Image: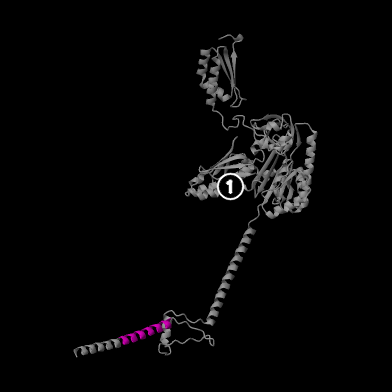
Amino acid sequence: MAARNTIERQWGRKQEMSKLVDNLLGKLGQLKRKVMTDTETNNAIPIESSGNAGAKEEIGDSKGNKPAVAADKNVRKQGRPRRKNPKAKTKATGATAQKDTAKKSQKQQKESMAAKSEKDTKKIEKEPVIKLLINAEEPEECRIALIEDGRVESFHVTTVVHEQTKGNIYKGRVTAIEPNLQVAFVDIGTGKNGFLPFSEIHPEYYTSDKAALKHWKDLNIQDVIKKGQEMLVQVVKEAAGTKGASVTTYLSLPGRFLVVMPGSDSHGISRKLEDEEERAKLRTMMSSLSIPEGIGYIIRTASKDITKTSLNKDLGYLLRLWNETKKRGQAVPSPALIYKDQNIIAKVLRDYYTPDIQEILVDTQESQKQVMDFLKLLPTKQRKTTVRLHQGSRPIFNQYAVEDQIEQIYQPVVKLPSGGSIVINPTEALVAIDVNSGRTAKDKNFNETIFLVNMEAATELARQLRLRDLGGLIVVDFIDMRNARHIREVEKEVKASMKRDRAKVDISRISKFGLMQISRQKLGRPIEMGSYHVCEYCQGRGVTRSVETQSLSYLRRIQTGVAHNNVVGARCRMPVKVAQYLLNNKREELLEMEKNYGAQIRIEPAPEMTPADHTIEFIKAENGSDK
């Protein structure tokens, strides 16, 4: 009985537990459904009905009731996106389009105003006034200056005493061969033998047929030419000092548009003609012309926009000139001048004339005719220059304020706008240019001041090299700069300024010592060499010995001379100041010499003597007897 009661109690408890679990599961199910309904409500997205684009999908609770307004508000509060209104979208799109149109209009207006401003600025900025002045009034000297806005940019001069020989063709004769130097010396009839390197000897002058088949680098000069051999040579570098002119057997005849090279098969175009379309056009024009075999050519910069007719005329003239030169070279004995390059006026017009020159002013009718004849040969497009004969009371160079600028060319110091300067010193080996800061160094901003002076020097040194025609190796000592950007800017300025130079130029970077090396082709004799002589006092050194130093040097020589046994006297002729110093300050020493050596010493002042001149004559005893 007790066991039965126990079982019933346990069964009742199980029933209660089962009901309790069912209730809990029911409540959990309701809670789960409620949570799922709330989640769907929050994540609901409005769907456009196919019948009405503006209708909303109704959202109900778990019992199917209609949604309350508060529910919609809750959805919006929780970030539900609003339904897009097409009309509002259209209005917004229209407003945006209007804004874009307004911005575009403002941008176009600004661009238009900027273009107009730039156009007005260009109108205000005048083109540079370029003139060519030719001063040939005096027969001994002819000077030509190219001025741009009153500033001399190019200067050329020739004198009767120092006529230029560069470009001349001579019939020469080999006088000596130097195997060690691999050069030959050629007598061209100018007083100094021409210097002919082996690399400048054309194979047509090789005496051996086998030698002509080999490259010149595999040969020796003594194996291919011989002493006494005649050849046509052309001067490529003027004689300087004790050195004779440098010559070559590779001849060239320059014209206005072409350079003809007999004995060559190379064809080229000036590097300054950079437009590929223009270069292709010139190549096509030249290929259509009749050019004899063995004649090379170079198309010059002046050929830009040239016509085929003008190019053909220039070619025909140069070919006729070469035939005449060749015939004369075969007829006359050596040494002789076969072809003389054009005079300075024709040469400058040929090499430097551009249509940018508005006016050419001359001071003689002969020069005017020569200029007019030159312009007639040019195409109509390049014939825009006015030629005028100067007839003023003042000389032409004074009238246009050029004379003072030319005098500055001969001075070693050139002032810069900021107060600094450059000092130019040509030497036998190189040209040294020193940049000085001057009074600008007192400025507070030291680095910027130094940069300014170096930039001005970079521009001016390029101009001075052109004006003075200085070539060879040039070393520029800039003021030390600490800023790497400043150094690069100065290098760029030098290269940009050198672009105007006709000569070939090679420029190095500025070293850590502030030095820049420039190699410049020598186009002719330096200006000062054509107009100046070596100083008879200092012999080109720039300094002379002091009176005291000279006097003591002569005194020692006198003592050495009278010390010989057979010398009984000395007769000395010296500059006045040196003689006065010896007689006034060294009289006791002279008297002591006379007493010790038994010789009579005579000092004579010579007013005509230069400081470096003197003569000391020692008088020997008769019959060579001792004192």
Q: Which residues are magenta?
A: 21-42
Mark 1 highlights which residue? 494
**Horizontal and vertical percent for residue 53?**
53, 85
* Residue 253 part of the magenta-drawn span: no
Q: Is residue 37 left or right of residue 169?
A: left
Q: Nearer the viewer, residue 517 or 486?
A: 517
Q: Is residue 209 above or below residue 506?
A: above
**Horizontal and vertical percent for residue 366?**
77, 43
**Horizontal and vertical percent for residue 338?**
76, 36
* Residue 38 part of the magenta-drawn span: yes
Q: Nearer the viewer, residue 316 or 262?
A: 262
Q: Is residue 140 above or below residue 360?
A: above
Q: Nearer the viewer, residue 419 or 627?
A: 627
| Type of the residue with mark 1 | Val
**Horizontal and vertical percent for residue 601?**
56, 16
Instruction: Mark yes or no: residue 171 visible.
Output: no
Quadrant of the drawing holding the C terminus: top right
